[in-house]
Image (cartoon, grey):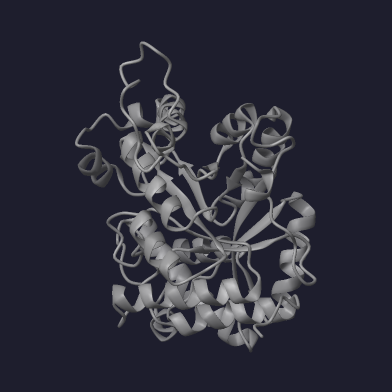
């Protein structure tokens, strides 16, 4: 696998490659169809403006997040784009049989050759009860503890290289390498590169030991970012995939034409997080609803803490914040997620960030 399927190139004045993390958020008064149309528009915008990759994340049982099926969304986005890398940020592997994921992403690779990333996490992407329903078991810790074994099995299916005597030796993920060994078979030279995702040290160390690229969730675990990246780099062992570490971080950032509007949108997104963290998940509220909401002292403390890690404001303010974060963490890539009530605000944010860095403009 070529490293250039992993590493990006910085565009314009950006310090590192810039990418997009789409949570497919659904605002109050909007539908999932509206959110998915925004995703298509955003993927096209990201491709036209030189963002390196576009990922969607697996979540479940959250009314305000319509990304429960990453593979389905990625197939839709692949049909509406031509060049940008598309991937999962991530698929929560313990929720699925590894063979199923190998088949899904083999299919995506066949649809969009050389453009698919497979990012994997070991968290459920939801609450414990929903995870139990997904997995049809209440032994949830087993899934997280078995993650290295599940990862190894998935890799074997993707490479079609179970050893002789293994019970899965005669089982093949299709589309996949087995097709090249069939009479008259021709197989694509590409297979989706694996990324490990994390918000703590476990996946950071595992990614380093395996020589895989690593994506850290700075947008909701900012206090752990630098320690996790340090652990990844210290643990890194060169592999057939990478000869040196490559780490991206997810960053919550929102730019608006006026600072006041950015603050309004960020407050609405924070209220959505307050409700999620207190067991009341719902649609992303409007800025007007957030401004009228009476936050308790505990909720206000949470909002202040949460928004301290959201880079927001005018385009110049956001560019300065992103530059500082890249320098402070040494991240090789910044993956930006913009949380706003409506699709127009999200699209405008990426457009403004692209302009602030002088990213390419469509002909």
On the image, the x and y values in percent for residue 73 come to 37, 62
Question: Is residue 28 placed above or below 175 in the rendered structure?
Answer: below
Residue 281 in sight here: yes
Quarter of image, res 78: bottom left
* Quadrant showing the C terminus: bottom right
- Image quadrant of residue 277? bottom left
Residue 289 point in image, percent of width and height: 38, 82
Residue at the location (64% across, 84% down)? Answer: 259
> x and y percent of residue 231 in the render?
68, 33
Q: Is residue 27 visible?
A: no
User: How many labels sit on residues?
Assistant: 0
Is 337 drawn above or below residue 28 in the view shown?
above
266 or 255, which lies in front?
Answer: 255
Quadrant hosting residue 355: bottom right
**Position of 80 relative to 137 (above/below):** below
Instruction: State left or right for residue 279 relative to residue 155.
Output: left
Q: Residue at x 77, y 64 (%)?
A: 323
């Amino acid at each position: 696998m070529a490293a250039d399927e992993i590493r990006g190139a910085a565009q314009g004045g950006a310090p590192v490659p810039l990418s997009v993390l789409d949570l497919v958020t659904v605002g109050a008064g909007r539908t999932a169809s509206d959110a998915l149309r925004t995703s298509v528009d955003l993927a096209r915008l990201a491709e036209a403006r030189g963002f390196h990759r576009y990922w969607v994340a697996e979540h479940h049982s959250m009314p305000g997040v319509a990304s429960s099926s990453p593979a389905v969304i990625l197939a839709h986005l692949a049909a509406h784009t031509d060049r940008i890398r598309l991937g999962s940020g991530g698929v929560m592997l313990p929720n699925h049989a590894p063979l199923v994921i190998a088949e899904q992403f083999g299919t995506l690779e066949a649809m969009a050759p050389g453009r698919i990333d497979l990012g994997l996490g070991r968290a459920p992407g939801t609450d414990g009860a929903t995870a139990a329903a997904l997995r049809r078991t209440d032994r949830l810790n087993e899934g997280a503890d078995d993650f290295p074994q599940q990862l190894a099995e998935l890799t074997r299916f993707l490479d079609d290289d179970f050893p002789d005597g293994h019970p899965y030796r005669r089982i093949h993920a299709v589309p996949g390498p087995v097709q090249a060994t069939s009479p008259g078979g021709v197989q694509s030279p590409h297979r989706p590169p694996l990324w490990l995702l994390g918000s703590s040290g476990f996946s950071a160390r595992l990614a380093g030991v395996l020589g895989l690229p690593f994506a850290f969730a700075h947008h909701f675990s900012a206090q752990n970012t630098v320690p996790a990246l340090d652990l990844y780099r210290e643990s890194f062992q060169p592999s057939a995939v990478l000869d040196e570490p490559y780490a991206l971080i997810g960053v919550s950032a929102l730019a608006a034409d006026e600072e006041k509007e950015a603050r309004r949108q960020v407050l609405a997104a924070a209220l959505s997080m307050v409700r999620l963290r207190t067991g009341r998940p719902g649609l992303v509220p409007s800025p007007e609803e957030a401004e009228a909401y009476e936050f308790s002292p505990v909720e206000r403390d949470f909002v202040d803490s949460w928004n301290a890690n959201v880079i927001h404001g005018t385009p110049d303010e956001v560019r300065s914040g992103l530059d500082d974060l890249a320098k402070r963490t040494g991240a090789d890539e910044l993956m930006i997620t913009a949380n706003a009530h409506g699709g127009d605000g999200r699209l405008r944010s990426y457009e403004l960030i692209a302009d602030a860095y002088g990213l390419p403009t469509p002909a």
